[in-house]
Amino acid sequence: MAVLTQTNVASTETTKPEINPIPILAVLLSGAFVAILSETILNVALNTIMADFGVASSTVQWLVTGYMLVIGTLIPISAYFMQRFTTRQLFISAMSLFTIGTIICGVSPVFSVLFIGRLTQAVGTAIMIPLLINIILTVIPIERRGAAMGMVGLVIMFAPAIGPTVSGLIVESLTWRWLFYFILPISIASLLFGMKVLTNMSETTKPKLDVISFLLSMIAFGFIVYGFSAAGKGDASFTDPLVFSFLLIGFISLTLFCWRQLKMDTPLLDIRVFRYPMFTLGLLMVMLVMMTMFAMMLVMPIYMQGALLFSAITAGLVLLPGGLLNGAMSPIMGRLFDKYGPRPLLIPGTIILAVVVFTYRYTTLGIPVWVVVIQQAVLMIAVAMIMMPSQTNGLNQIPKELYPHGTAIANTLTQVSGAIGAALFISVMENGQHSYLQSKSIINPTEEELIAALTYGSQQSFSTGFYMALVAIVLALFVRRVTHANQA
């Protein structure tokens, strides 16, 4: 998307009534759906892929980690892509790459080819998600953006919610290759539909790519995402020399990247968007909620199977209604945001979030399954009340020429906060388990003692999520509605 000059703004405003946003959003949402669905659809099939290709779990995990790394490193430079290329060029490129990657994955004869296909899919996804939000900011009037962003929330939550379920059914009945054959027709249809109806939204500015900024960006976000992801897996922790080195290099590169952007007349990623308080406040809330939600999405399945003694199928089904309900509530919350603004949603939403996370501390062995289902459902309703209003209100405040930069920064930090949340809460849980066993001087724990240790560690993780939710409540009190773009 182009960085708009005053002339470009005027041109866009005069032609906006001629743009029908419905087919444009239909194209972008369909593309985003298959892209996000692919992020989670492979998780259930990893064991089968390990057996088929004869690879270890540490190797097969790169199908997930590599996907996330590519997205984390490419989203920061999406602002450059949206200035350099037209909307139509970006969408066709993104969906073409995603489709090609899907085909490669489906027919891959060896693991290395499958991995290349996954990385190709990830490149398309990294372009698609910021493009979707940027187009909404461009073609949708500010008074109706809540409803449009609500549809984005539906796609973003519905796709990963059904991903594991669809994956489990397909893998059980067919082979893991059908996971890619399943999404291929949707991807092709979205690509063809986009080629037919998608038009260019603005002029391009042809900015020059600053290679140093590009390299610093890739190192910074790539190393940070990988470092936090590695810290949450296996026996690794933040004190592990390799993890610590990745994080140190990542944050040093990030500092240099930010310093360089402030010195440049045309930065690769304009961090001056943080001068707009509602954007900064909204982004902080999104990051906190993302991290808190990860405490439930990652720790709870482990806790349900290891301490509550639910079966794997039951644990998966417990999480499904909440994800579906969150997707269904997102458009409703969008309309309420358009009508009433963010505060009537954010303040009760953060309070509900804190209360529900607190109740998880009292979820112990013997609790009925339906209680956990209700907890998860209410939690995801609270997330729907917070995520879209805080992000939309913040993006509404930044001026049009910073839209590409604002969406790139928001998506990047959301991705990074997800990785941080995953590592943080898993680390808190495992450290809690170890400290419990050490405090009891247990060397060879029995099954009951292992359950008690996991319960203690999980409750420590839930407590951390509760404290984050309390911070979100405080931040929500300072949010105010932005009624016009560029309003400070």
Image (cartoon, rainbow, N blue to C red):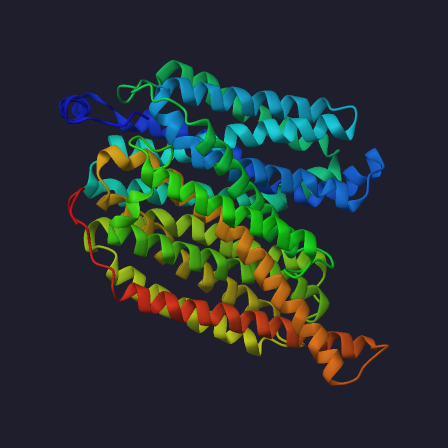
Residue at the far bottom in the pictured view: 440
Residue at the far top in the pictured view: 196
Can residue 304 be seen here? The reply is yes
**Residue 224 location (% of width, % of height):** 55, 48
Q: Is residue 138 left or right of residue 99?
A: left
- The residue positioned 45% from the left and 64% from the top of the image is 378
The N terminus: image quadrant: top left
**Residue 353 location (% of width, % of height):** 42, 66
**Residue 324 location (% of width, % of height):** 49, 50
- Report the front residue among 13 and 79: 79
- The residue positioned 74% from the left and 59% from the top of the image is 235
- The residue positioned 74% from the left and 40% from the top of the image is 60
Q: Is residue 103 left or right of residue 173?
A: left
- The residue positioned 72% from the left and 84% from the top of the image is 439
Q: Is residue 350 left or right of residue 35?
A: left
Looking at the image, is 470 positioned above or below residue 157? below
**Residue 455 location (% of width, % of height):** 66, 75
Can residue 131 be seen here? The reply is no
Looking at the image, is 135 positioned above or below residue 409? above
- Report the front residue among 18 and 259: 259
Looking at the image, is 110 positioned above or below residue 299? above
Q: Find residue 51 and report its image quarter.
A: top right
- Report the front residue among 134 and 26: 134
